[in-house]
Structure formats: C-alpha cells, structure tokens
Amino acid sequence: MNGYDSVDAYIEAAEHWQDELRTLRAILLATDLEETVKWGGPCYTCDGENVVGLGAFKAYFGLWFHQGVLLTDPAGVLINAQQGKTRAQRQWRFTSSDEINKRMVRSYVQEAIRLCRDGRKVTPQRGKPVDLPPELTAARAEKPAAKAAFEAFTIGKRREFAAHVAEAKRAETRQRRVNKIIPMILAGEGLNDRYR
C-alpha cells in the first residue's frame, strides 16, 4: 500500500487486518498524539515529532515506534526489523486481534510520548565514511571522471550507490550493478533521483 492521503483511505485499502488497525488507531487517537499520513501510511506525532506509525502487511500488522530503542519494553515485544540499518526505530508486530492488549499498548504509547516531550531521541550518525565495495572502487579507478563525479555527490547519495552494489550476493550481480550505475554517476544522477 502506498500514496494514501488519509488514515481512513489507508485502512479501507488494507487487504488484511482492517478491524485490528481500527482498534490500534482508537488507542492512538485517545492520546495527545496528532494523526497524519507520512510515507503513505498512518503516523502519529507529538509537538511535530514522529512518535509512532501504524501499518499492515500480509502476515502481520503493527506499530512502529520511531524512538523505540529508548522504550523500556518490559514485555519484550519490540524488534529491530532492519538490524544494522535502523538505530532508533522498533516494531511491535501482531498476528491476531487476540494479541492486542489495549492496556499494554497504551502504556508503551504513553512512554513514547513522555520520551518525546523530554526531548529524548537517538540522532542519526553523521560523518561515518562510505564503505565502497571492491567492484565500485575498481570502476572508479578505471574512470577518473567517474571518481570525480562520485565524490561530487552528497555522502547520502554515495552511500546509496555503495549499498546498492554491496547488497548483491553474487559477484556477477555486483558487477552488473556497477556497470548500470557508472553512467548515472557520470551524468550526475543519483541512484534514486528518479523516484524523489
């Protein structure tokens, strides 16, 4: 699901878990959080800061606490869905309506609101060097213009290129990706510029 301009539209379009989403939404709306849509899905904010998101997929539905790593998590329900990538966000996944303990959900949400109001948050790491895969390093060495063009990108765009290549498991796929991105780099086009 993507591109919804209201939470109602998001829930109505959900193939699964509509009633469960409505139950969690009611808990969130009973707090001081403001409801909005960000990234095409329901997001709840406090004083302009993202606190919790709501979403549904085929196998589960859940809550995304933007600063979830700071929550005490007494029930041990929070997970990091992207180990090594996500520092602060934590998910609480549900696979049935029976798993929704309203009192416990309210407790987690209230703690997240308190942390937000106290100004507690994990900030993104800045200045970490870009780790280039060998295939990209070799291609830059072969084409000095590509190296200069690559260095002209922001560090975030350089990371996107490096990750795109490095995430491929097979050497052939990594090389194919390098061959695809070198013309983009020379043209000054970021990996995801077409989608921004």
Image: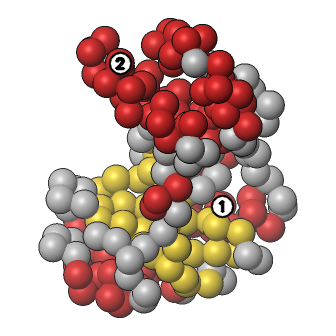
Q: In x, y percent, where is residue 84?
A: 52, 28
For the point 71% across and 28% down, which residue is it?
148
For label 2, count other residues whose C-alpha is less than 10 Å away and answer few (under 14), some (14-19) or many (20+): some
Viewer-proximal residue among 126 and 66? 126
Secondary element at tag 1: helix
Indicate the amino acid at tag 2: Gln
Indicate the amino acid at tag 1: Glu
> Would you identify the image quadrant in which residue 98 lies?
bottom left
Q: Quadrant of the N terminus?
A: bottom left
Q: In x, y percent, where is residue 96?
A: 20, 61
Q: Which residue is mark 1?
A: 111
Is residue 11 visible in the rendered structure shown here?
yes
Q: In x, y percent, where is residue 40?
A: 43, 73
Q: Is residue 61 above or below residue 137?
A: below
Viewer-proximal residue among 58 and 76? 58
Q: Which residue is mark 2?
A: 175
Viewer-proximal residue among 111 and 53? 53
Q: Is residue 1 above or below residue 166?
A: below
Is residue 19 visible in the rendered structure shown here?
no
Number of numbered labels in the structure image? 2
Viewer-proximal residue among 144 and 20? 144
> Would you identify the image quadrant in which residue 81 lies?
top left
For the point 54% across and 83% down, which residue is it?
36
For the point 83% across and 59% down, which residue is it?
119
